Image (tube, rainbow, N blue to C red):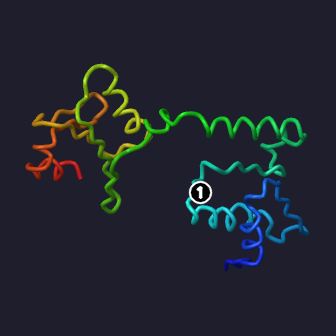
Amino acid sequence: MVIKRDFYIDKLMAVRHNGLVKVITGVRRCGKSYLLFNLYRDALNAEGLGDDHFVCAQLDDDDSEGLRTPRALSQWIKARIEEASRPTVEKKRREINFVVNNGMKKLYIQSALTISPDGKLEQETASLRRTGDFFRKIVVVGGSQQPRLDEEGILYVGVVPFLVDTSILDSII
């Protein structure tokens, strides 16, 4: 059962842009962490703020023992903010254009106009290789390139055969 706590969320949302740090206090196990890490985050997500805008640390966790001094915590937070504000070139390399789910099967599809040897191949396939799973991966390129598999099992195919030849998808899904 989820207790919404709209009263508290409304108060937090009303003062979120005032430049002050918000401190939530309460007795042990009353839902402070749940309020912040789930309900408040959901409310901010609903307004369009992405998860990359949140810095969360649970200081009672043994893994966070090194963050329990003000200086260490401040440095850690600054590092997270700096990390999140770096240019998104690396983040874009991790995007996959399409993910098709069919029951327990999954298919990743990346699209690229061309894959020339000047690093475009690496850029387009890096996100596919980083999935860490063994589901099928396809790169659809412009033109009529016939299907070919690379050594990592990634299928490269031109957009024309991809759209016309249904056996390409049938054989891999």
- Tell me the residue at 57%/66% (across/down): 46
* Percent coordinates x, y for residue 37 in the rendering: 70, 60
* Percent coordinates x, y for residue 18 in the rendering: 78, 58
* Percent coordinates x, y for residue 64 in the rendering: 80, 43
The quadrant holding residue 124 is top left
In the rendered image, the quadrant that contains the N terminus is bottom right
Q: Secondary structure at mark 1?
A: loop
Q: Is residue 4 left or right of residue 158?
A: right
- In the picture of the structure, the residue carrying the numbered disc 1 is 49
Residue placed most toward the observer, 101 or 53? 53
- Tell me the residue at 23%/37% (across/down): 155
Residue placed most toward the observer, 78 or 122? 78
- 86 shown above or below 41: above
Q: What amino acid type should be assigned to the residue bearing mark 1?
A: Leu
Q: Is residue 41 left or right of residue 18?
A: left
* Percent coordinates x, y for residue 130 in the rendering: 44, 37
- 71 shown above or below 61: above
